[in-house]
Amino acid sequence: MNVQIPCGCGQTVTVDSSQAGLTVQCPCGREVEVPAWQRPPGGEDRERAGSGASRLTELGWAFVILAVVAVLVTGVAAGSLYEFLGLQGTREARKFRAIMSGGALLLVCAAGAALRVVFGARFYRE
C-alpha cells in the first residue's frame, strides 16, 4: 500500500508501507523519515481475544447442541414413522423427514428468540 509523506519543501514523497521506519530521499534532496507503523491502542488485544476464544456463551452452546439433537431426533422419528407405515424409501418419506426436521429447527430457533426478547438472554459474548 502506498503512503504519501510530506517533505519540508512542500512536496510529497510516495513510499510503500513496507518502508515504515526508514529514511527516503525527496526529489528536492532532503531526507524524509517514514514514520513507523503502530497498531492502534488496544488493537492487538482485540485481535488475539477474538481469534482464540469462542464468542458463544454457555447458553449459546446449549442451543446449538439442542438444535442439532432436535433435527437428528426428528429426522429419525419421521423416518421410523414412515417405515412403520410401510412407505420407506419413497419420495414423500424424504420430503416428510426434511419438513419435520426443519420444523424442529424452527421451533428451537423460535424458543431462542423468545428467550432473547422476553428474558434478555445472551447467546454471544460482546
Image: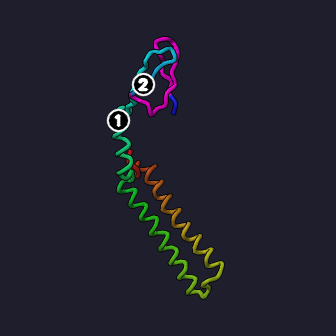
**The one of 19 and 116 positioned closer to us in this rendering:** 19
Which residue is at a point 34% across and 35% down the rendered structure image? 42
As drawn, is 124 to the left or to the right of 4? left
Image spot of residue 3 (x, y percent): 50, 27
Q: Which residue is mark 2?
A: 34
**The one of 37 and 123 positioned closer to us in this rendering:** 37
Sequence order check, earlier mark of 2 and 1:
2
As drawn, is 17 to the left or to the right of 99? left
Q: What is the crowding at mark 1: few (fewer than 14 residues within 10 Å), some, or many (at least 20)?
A: few
Cα distance in 3D space between marks 2 and 1: 23 Å
Image spot of residue 50 (x, y percent): 38, 46
Image spot of residue 9 (x, y percent): 49, 11
Which span of residues is magenta-colored? 3-21
Query: Which amino acid, by three-letter code, is at mark 2?
Result: Val
Q: How many marks?
A: 2
Which residue is at a point 58% across and 71% down the rendered structure image? 98
Looking at the image, is 10 positioned above or below residue 78?
above
Magenta highlight on residue 115: no
Which disc is residue 72 wearing? Answer: none
Looking at the image, is 15 positioned above or below residue 82?
above
Looking at the image, is 62 positioned above or below residue 27?
below
Which disc is residue 42 wearing? Answer: 1
Image spot of residue 27 (x, y percent): 52, 17
Q: Quadrant of residue 86?
A: bottom right
Indicate the secondary structure of the residue bearing disc 1: loop
Name the quadrant of the C terminus: top left
Indicate the secondary structure of the residue bearing disc 2: loop
